[in-house]
Amino acid sequence: MPDTIMLFAAGRGTRMAPLTDHMAKPMVRVAGRPLVDHALDLVRGANIKRVFANTFYQPDALEAHVLTQGVTPIREAVLLETGGGLKQALTRLDRDVVLTLNTDAVWTGHNPIARLLKQWNPDHMDALLCLIPPDSALGHSGAGDFTCDTDGRLIRGPGYIYSGLQIIKTARLAEIKQQVFSLNLLWDMFIRQDRLFGMVHDGQWCDVGQPESITMAEDMLRV
């Protein structure tokens, strides 16, 4: 079972300006706590012990904070996006299968990491993505990212929204030669072999992508 998680925390957070003019987006407070701490609640609740976080923008305060939480920061010299960031970190992660989690959302419902681990089947899956039904997603616009069949196998198309949480095999990252790239490239490789799967989250999820989303997220957490 995967025992290592990579927190994606390197982005510039430009849509969160002016709050991110002088701080990294994961340090923006929601319900009195930095966004990264809400992500770490899920990590601890699923008993994941090996925790890493990539950093780039305004890294000093973020790195100091996560170090107090038992997280190992990995600073990027240039912004590498999700795929490039994960590929660069592989020597530190030292695992063929890892979890990744974005740090810019808050959740209700059962712990999605714990549920994802229970549904992970490496014999049939190269990645298992946690998905959100559109009516359970706050602060997010768009028609969705994936549709799935009765077995949970994913293809591109309007429907479910990718939550920013997944279990993923990392071996095929070596086939991608770019330094800066999105994990969408790896997912497309998995789709072509029918090995990309999804699990639907059973609670609500709020994408804290802009300042007005903070109130939305706090209202969701109070319910």
Image (tube, rainbow, N blue to C red):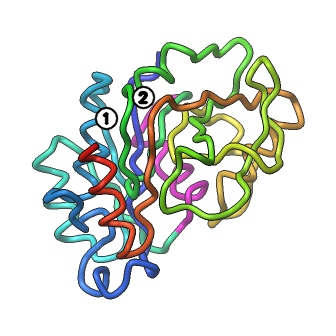
In the figure, is residue 38 to the left or right of 98? left
- Work out whether mark 2 precedes mark 1 in sequence or the reverse, and give the earlier one: 1
Closer to the camera, 5 or 116? 116
Closer to the camera, 179 or 186? 186
Above or below, 38 against 9 in this view is: above
Closer to the camera, 158 or 82? 158
Residue 34 inside the magenta-drawn segment: no
User: From this viewpoint, which residue is outermost toward the left?
Assistant: 68
- Residue at the location (34% across, 51% down)? 53
- Residue at the location (15% across, 44% down)? 69
* Span highlighted in magenta in the image: 80-95
In the figure, is residue 180 to the left or right of 203? right
| Residue where numbered disc 2 is placed | 113
Residue 91 inside the magenta-drawn segment: yes
- Residue 140: where, in percent of width, then height? 55, 61
Helix, strand or loop for the magenta stretch, by majority: helix
- From mark 2 to mark 1, how far is it between C-alphas? 7 Å
Q: Answer yes or no: do the residues labelled 2 and 1 have beta carbons within 8 Å? A: yes
Closer to the camera, 41 or 177? 41
Does dot 2 land on a helix, a strand or a loop? Answer: helix
| Residue where numbered disc 1 is placed | 42
Q: Amino acid at mark 1?
A: Leu
Does dot 1 land on a helix, a strand or a loop? Answer: helix
- Residue 145: where, in percent of width, then height? 72, 50
User: From this viewpoint, which residue is outermost toward the front?
Assistant: 223
In the figure, is residue 221 to the left or right of 111? left
